[in-house]
Amino acid sequence: MPSVKSLLAGAPAELRFDTELLIARALGWNRAKVFAFGEVEPTADVLEKLAPELARLHAGEPLAYITGSREFFGLEFTVSPDVLIPRADTELLVELAIDQCPTNARVADLGTGSGAIAVSLKHARPDLSIVAVDRSAAALTVAANNAARHGCDIECVISDWYQNLNGQFDVVISNPPYIRADDPHLPSLRFEPVEALVAGALGLDDYKKLAAGAATKLAPGGLLFVEQGADQADAVANLFTQSGLTDIVTYNDLAGHCRVTRARKNES
């Protein structure tokens, strides 16, 4: 039987950390124990479970899809290939919404995917009334399960952006697809749903829809928050201005990248 140490030795350097996590998970250990007990030989049952997981990891599949889970904003979220894996970059979007959503606001999270934004926001601000929106029924099932997992009362609606939404919202929040169709990084994201990643030749198609719909679906004075690519802030701001939105502000993430844009609908 191979030892823990030999299993680690067979991992490429860039996969070492994830390999440690998979081994620890299979053995019911923490990472520290993986280092301390490298000579232990896992049982045949453990290896039978671990071997295909390591093969998937070496084939490029993200760890989150292998384990079915990803931490976001201090909460653990179930994920599947039906949804985008939540990224730490998106936590800024949640932080801003927590700080700026009016009390008892009605909020729509468009393109909710796993529900990471909607659930994190509701968990931190129970006063908010949140509608999680996605055009994928499979994604909404994941979002609903995550809401239930964390005891968050969230309405889930199947809709292509604003299409099936009733009434107006005080806040609309979204991490839409924003990758260009010819982006060279797309092959490395091949396990994630392409419809949650790509938005036309310039990566701006869905910002146009979000901006256009805000004219009728945002309440007077309502706020629109979106995540964007680091080089898209000016283009997104221009689209929002052309749609009549005002008070446009761009926020940088911890790496100094222009990560979130906020806009407001006029009061009148």
Image (spheres, rainbow, N blue to C red):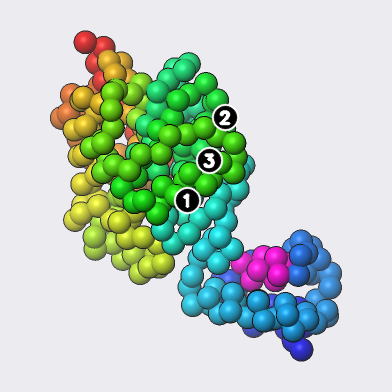
Outermost residue toward the left in this view: 242
| Span colored in magenta | 18-26
Dot 2, how many residues are within 10 Å of its Cα: few (below 14), some (14-19), or many (20+)? some
First of labels 3, 2 by sequence position:
2
Instruction: Report the residue marked by disc 2.
Output: 124
State the SS at label 1. helix
Pointer 3 and pointer 2: residues touching (CB < 8 Å)? no
Q: Residue at x 25, y 26 (%)?
A: 217
**Is residue 56 in view?**
yes
Instruction: Report the residue marked by disc 3.
Output: 147
Pointer 1 and pointer 2: residues touching (CB < 8 Å)? no
Q: Callout 1, which amino acid? A: Val
Instruction: Report the residue marked by disc 1.
Output: 142
**Looking at the picture, how far across and down is residue 198, in whole percent?**
28, 56
Residue 78 shows which numbered tag? none
Give the distance between the C-alpha atoms of the residues marked 3 and 2, in whole angstroms. Answer: 13 Å
Q: Residue at x 47, y 17 (%)?
A: 104
Q: Callout 3, which amino acid? A: Ala
Nearer mark to the viewer, of 3 and 2: 3
Give the distance between the C-alpha atoms of the residues marked 1 and 3, in whole angstroms. Answer: 9 Å
**Looking at the picture, how far across and down is residue 155, in whole percent?**
43, 34
